[in-house]
Image (cartoon, rainbow, N blue to C red):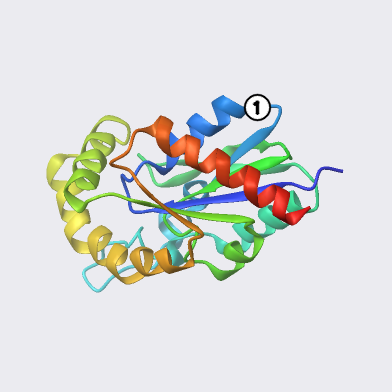
Amino acid sequence: MIKPFFVGLAGGSGSGKTTLAKSLHSHLGSDQTSIFCLDWYYHDICKQPKLDDGSINFDHPSALDQYLLINHLQQLKKGRNVNAPIYNFATHHRSKLTRKIANRPTIFIEGLHTLVLSEVRRILDLKIFIDLSDDIRFIRRLLRDKSERKRSLQTVINQYLATTRPMYIEWVLPSRRFADVVLSAENSVSEMKRIVLSQIQATSKAGN
């Protein structure tokens, strides 16, 4: 049975968590690593709590199906594979299909609330927070949501001002204090990857 080494990648929307996770995964290989994304675990829109104006706060931790998320992480910790949900961000509904996440020696867990949720933090062997200025993160989010999630400019702006920015300030930014390492996304992906790899090696040796 493989006892995985869990690396958490946290940071604000648009900070580069997914990009860094994919780069690390590509570097180390799919036979050695898996990626586990918190974004897969959003509740269906019909189950999301609504704000007073009827809108939904997707940036609050309660927007996630935390029970299923934690259950799957615990299964991975026990050396088992899991069938993670597939979430459609255009329709805000979970697909009937799932994606197999194989247990591997290293598992990268990435998402806004990776360091916010205490049960996730307890599973992590290495906790990383990615810092990036608000303006750059907003531009990245705008470009992503328009191209990948088919949202309008005004919709992205409205959500950013109503929930994304306030929730970053209330939840995500304070979770920075839990990080073992804080990376600046002003650095290149290759430089951040180098730092993470050296930290994995050092932490793994210290744990043995």
Compared to 182, does 175 lie above or below? below
- Quadrant into which the N terminus falls: top right
As drawn, the residue found furthest toward the left would be 154
Q: Nearer the viewer, residue 140 or 180?
A: 180
Q: Quadrant of residue 57?
A: bottom left
- Three-letter code for the amino acid on which mark 1 is drawn: Ser
Compared to 60, does 208 lie above or below? above
Residue 151: tell me if it is visible. no
Q: Nearer the viewer, residue 104 or 37?
A: 104
Compared to 87, does 49 lie above or below? below
Residue 10: tell me if it is visible. yes
Please tell me which residue is depicted at 71% across the width and 36% down the height of the picture. Answer: 102
In the rendered image, residue 187, in percent from the top left (x then y), is placed at 32, 38
SS class, disc 1: loop
In the rendered image, residue 52, in percent from the top left (x then y), is placed at 24, 74
Please tell me which residue is depicted at 41% across the width and 62% down the height of the picture. Answer: 48
Compared to 174, does 206 lie above or below? above
Please tell me which residue is depicted at 68% across the width and 53% down the height of the picture. Answer: 72
Please tell me which residue is depicted at 72% across the width and 57% down the height of the picture. Answer: 74
- Few, some or many C-alpha atoms within 10 Å of disc 1 (few <14, some 14-19, many ≥20)? some
As drawn, the residue found furthest toward the right would be 1
In the rendered image, residue 168, in percent from the top left (x then y), is placed at 30, 62
Q: Nearer the viewer, residue 11 or 45?
A: 11
As drawn, the residue found furthest toward the bottom would be 52
Tell how many labels.
1
- Residue position for label 1: 30
In the rendered image, residue 148, in percent from the top left (x then y), is placed at 32, 32
From the viewer's perspective, is 133 left or right of 47? left
